[in-house]
């Protein structure tokens, strides 16, 4: 019995001795879910996962420039471009899920009407101020909204009352304080912030989903551990966590 326990203990120590630190550069839409699921992966494997968060456009540019990291999480079209350029290992890609554009307000504030395209348009024109992440950083929600406002014919009216959040702390902080009336972000991020309330997703005719994908970078120095992480994120339990926090199946 003692020998068996010692064997298990030695095997466990050997496994953890081979543990790696996995660097992930990722779009911040998955941050709330990974805060929940990744600790279990670390406990099971002994690996440590270090995230560097940002807009998917920024992460795609960094991966394209050859940054040394192990895993990248970006939109599916960006991932396909990285595959064509040989920046990621083609056979390693997984699709995490898709998340749409959501509208949010300060906790306890009245919810504006966004039930139809016309109601959304009126709410935008009546709003004191709106805010979203800096489109110059490659934030997909912001880039989409700028085009949407043009399609709706309200771009000129929205420009003077639109705030582009340049600091991560302001993505929700400005709305939570009441400095900005209405905010936009990925639904998966909004539902994780207790200081704000999700009004709802954009109306279906003008909704835009971002499909997020992960893969092992060609520059990875811990390929085996990186692949282990991706296999874990594709498990039923991890996928259920994504589905319960604002992600849908692609």
Image (cartoon, rainbow, N blue to C red):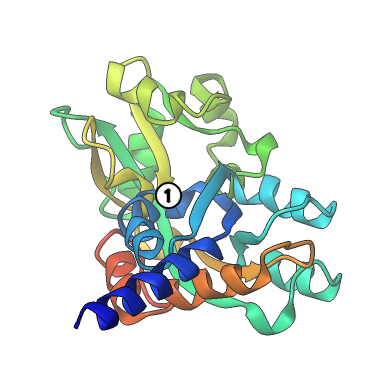
Residue 31: horizontal and vertical position, in percent?
Answer: 42, 49
Quarter of the picture holding the C terminus:
bottom left
Q: Which residue is mark 1?
A: 31
Residue placed furthest toward the left? 108
Residue 145 appears in view: no
Report the front residue among 144 and 197. Answer: 197
Residue 123 appears in view: yes
Image position of 112 with respect to 20: above or below = above
Quarter of the picture holding the N terminus:
bottom left
The picture quadrant where one finds residue 245 is bottom left
Q: Residues within 10 Å of mark 1 (few under 14, many from 20)?
A: some
Report the front residue among 114 and 44. Answer: 44
Image position of 128 with respect to 76: above or below = above
* Mark 1 secondary-structure assignment: helix
- Compared across the picture, whether 47 is left or right of 73 comes to left
Report the front residue among 32 and 158. Answer: 32
Q: Residue at x 27, y 47 (%)?
A: 191
Q: Residue at x 55, y 51 (%)?
A: 27
Image position of 107 with respect to 217: above or below = above
Q: How many marks?
A: 1
Q: Residue at x 42, y 59 (%)?
A: 100
Residue 193: horizontal and vertical position, in percent?
Answer: 28, 38
Residue 241: horizontal and vertical position, in percent?
Answer: 28, 66
Image position of 20 with respect to 231: above or below = above
Q: Residue at x 35, y 60 (%)?
A: 43
Residue 40: horizontal and vertical position, in percent?
Answer: 32, 62
- Compared across the picture, whether 73 is left or right of 46 comes to right
């Amino acid at each position: 019995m003692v020998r068996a326990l010692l064997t298990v203990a030695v095997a466990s120590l050997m496994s953890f001795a081979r543990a790696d630190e996995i660097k992930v550069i990722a779009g911040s839409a998955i941050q709330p879910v990974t805060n929940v699921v990744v600790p279990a992966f670390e406990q099971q494997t002994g690996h440590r996962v270090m995230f560097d968060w940002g807009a998917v456009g920024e992460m795609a540019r960094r991966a394209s420039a050859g940054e040394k990291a192990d895993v990248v999480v970006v939109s599916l079209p960006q991932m396909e471009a990285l595959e064509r350029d040989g920046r990621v290992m083609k056979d390693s890609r997984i699709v995490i899920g898709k998340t749409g554009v959501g509208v949010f307000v300060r906790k306890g504030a009245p919810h504006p009407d966004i039930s139809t395209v016309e109601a959304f348009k009126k709410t935008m024109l009546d709003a004191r101020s709106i805010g979203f992440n800096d489109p110059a950083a490659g934030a997909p929600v912001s880039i989409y909204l700028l085009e949407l406002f043009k399609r709706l014919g309200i771009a000129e009216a929205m420009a003077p009352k639109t705030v582009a959040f340049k600091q991560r702390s302001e993505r929700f902080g400005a709305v939570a304080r009441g400095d900005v009336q209405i905010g936009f972000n990925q639904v998966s991020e909004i539902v994780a912030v207790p200081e704000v309330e999700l009004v709802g997703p954009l109306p279906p005719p003008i909704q835009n989903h971002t499909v997020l994908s992960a893969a092992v970078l060609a520059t990875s120095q811990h390929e085996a551990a990186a692949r282990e992480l991706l296999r874990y994120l594709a498990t039923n339990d991890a996928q259920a966590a994504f589905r319960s926090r604002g992600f849908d199946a692609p």
